[in-house]
Image (cartoon, grey):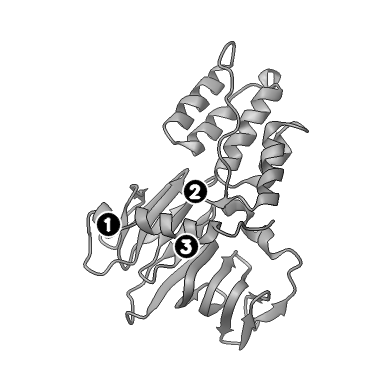
Amino acid sequence: MRRGPHVFPFLIGLLLWHAHPSLAQERCEVWAARLASLQGQVDVKTATRTGWQPLQREGVLCPGDSVRVGANSRAALVLPSETILRLDQRTTVTFPEAKDEETSFLDLVEGLGYFMSRVPRMLKVRTPFVNAAVEGTEFVVAATGEAARVLVFEGSVSADNAAGRLRITSGEGAVAARGAAPTRIVVVEPRDAVKWALYYPPVVDHPLEDAPAGVHAAVASFNRGDIAGALAALEHVPAESRDAEFYDFRASMLLQVGRVEAALASAPIGSVVCRAQEEGDHDGGRYG
């Protein structure tokens, strides 16, 4: 998978424009992040309220706020350092109080975060198993219930915990399990870790004539921008009513939220979804 030569600068410029302070009402004088885009279900728990609430488009996040990305969903945030943070499905992050103006801080509770910046920025990411002090322009941090890992595409990262410290640079990775020092790992296809961040335009219009009620509901949800709702509605379509067009339509919805493997498993061989995914891999696509 290769990235087009003009994709990355264009993407960052576009996301920064969408997250400009004038486009959102300030909730705090010193903000921690701004929402640039979302697909699916993304919730926020603020420092001043209990419980999770849907994150509004063009929303502002303050120190102490947490963001939770649901299943079949994803989000893009802009940090004060102008770093773009893309959050994969089932990811939760918290933004602690900033200690200085030159460094961005965040806690990755679980899930996967993909960080991109035009120029190297200082960023400190804490996970349950390893802390990452980053001076890079492109990297991934992921945390599960058993371990955390860091992949560096460009730049360098100091990964440390109570058991040890390790510095990794471009093209390298590190993993740390519970109670163990971070160790270096070899990643054969590192960009497979961020396939979910690619943007694929909708390629299928499902014909509604004689379509099951679940498909009608899915199309209505999609037209409202509710991809998670569209996928949930498709799960209610009876198995005997699921034809090739149904699976192609579901695969297109899965691509909208970056679920490439699931989309390919759902789409019929030779479908327009399969062709779109193959073309995206070869021309670099766009990071949505």
* In the depicted structure, whether residue 57 falls above or below residue 239: below
Instruction: Indicate which disc, 3 or 1, sits on the residue closer to the N terminus.
Output: 1
Q: Amino acid at mark 2?
A: Gly
Regarding mark 2 in the picture, which secondary structure is present there? loop
Name the mark on residue 70: 2
Q: Is residue 62 left or right of residue 77?
A: left
* In the depicted structure, whether residue 161 falls above or below residue 272: below
Q: Is residue 133 left or right of residue 274?
A: left
Give coordinates of residue 66: x percent, y percent. Answer: 38, 61
Quarter residue 93 falls in: bottom left
Q: Residues within 10 Å of mark 3 (few under 14, many from 20)?
A: many
> Rounded to the nearest whole Å, what is the CA distance between mark 3 and mark 1?
24 Å
**Which residue sits at x=73%, y=63%?**
189
Judging by the rendered image, the residue that carries numbered circle 3 is 85
Q: Amino acid at mark 1?
A: Arg
**Which residue sits at x=33%, y=76%?**
98
Quadrant (top left/top right/bottom left/bottom right) for the N terminus? bottom right
Mark in the foreground, 2 or 1: 2
Judging by the rendered image, the residue that carries numbered circle 1 is 49
Regarding mark 3 in the picture, which secondary structure is present there? strand
